[in-house]
């Protein structure tokens, strides 16, 4: 990475599944699984923020188990 702002945001993505975060940051498809309250949504929001800050990522597809979860994720982004 060339800018220190991106590095500090990358640090925000550290979480329970570092391999998933690394895959997402590398532009790869990844599944993130976990029970309620394990930080999945927060991790996805932080990772998306990093990707959006880098530019070049015009869209992201996130599948959720229900419409309620999808609404929550959309509203928090």
Image: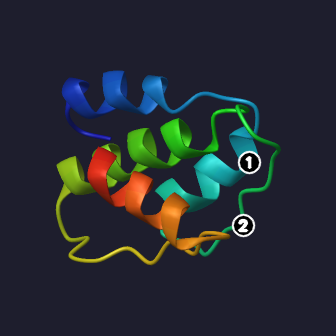
Where, by quadrant of the figure, is residue 52 drawn? bottom left
Task: Give x and y (percent) for residue 33.
Answer: 79, 55
The residue lying at 31 percent from left, 45 percent from top is 76
In the depicted structure, whether residue 68 falls above or below residue 48: below
Q: Are marks 2 and 1 in contact (CB under 8 Å)?
A: no
Secondary structure beneath disc 2? loop
Give the Cα separation between the discs numbered 2 and 1.
Answer: 10 Å
| Residue 26 in view (yes/no) | no
Count of residue discs: 2
In-image side of 45 versus 15 (left or right): left
Tag 1: Cα neighbours inside 10 Å, few (<14), some, or many (≥20)?
few
Task: Give x and y (percent) for residue 15.
Answer: 66, 29
| Numbered badge on residue 19 | 1
In-image side of 35 versus 25 (left or right): right
| Numbered badge on residue 31 | 2
The residue lying at 63 percent from left, 44 percent from top is 40
Say which label, 2 or 1, has the lower sequence index.
1
Where, by quadrant of the figure, is residue 16 drawn? top right
In the depicted structure, whether residue 36 falls above or below residue 57: above
| Numbered badge on residue 39 | none
| Residue 39 in view (yes/no) | yes
The residue lying at 82 percent from left, 43 percent from top is 35
């Amino acid at each position: 990475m060339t800018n220190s702002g991106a590095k500090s945001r990358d640090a925000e993505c550290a979480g329970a599944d570092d391999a998933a975060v690394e895959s997402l940051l590398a532009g790869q498809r990844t599944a993130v699984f976990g029970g309620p309250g394990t930080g999945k949504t927060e991790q996805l929001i932080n990772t998306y923020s990093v990707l959006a800050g880098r530019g070049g990522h015009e869209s992201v597809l996130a599948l959720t188990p229900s419409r309620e979860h999808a609404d929550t994720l959309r509203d928090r982004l």
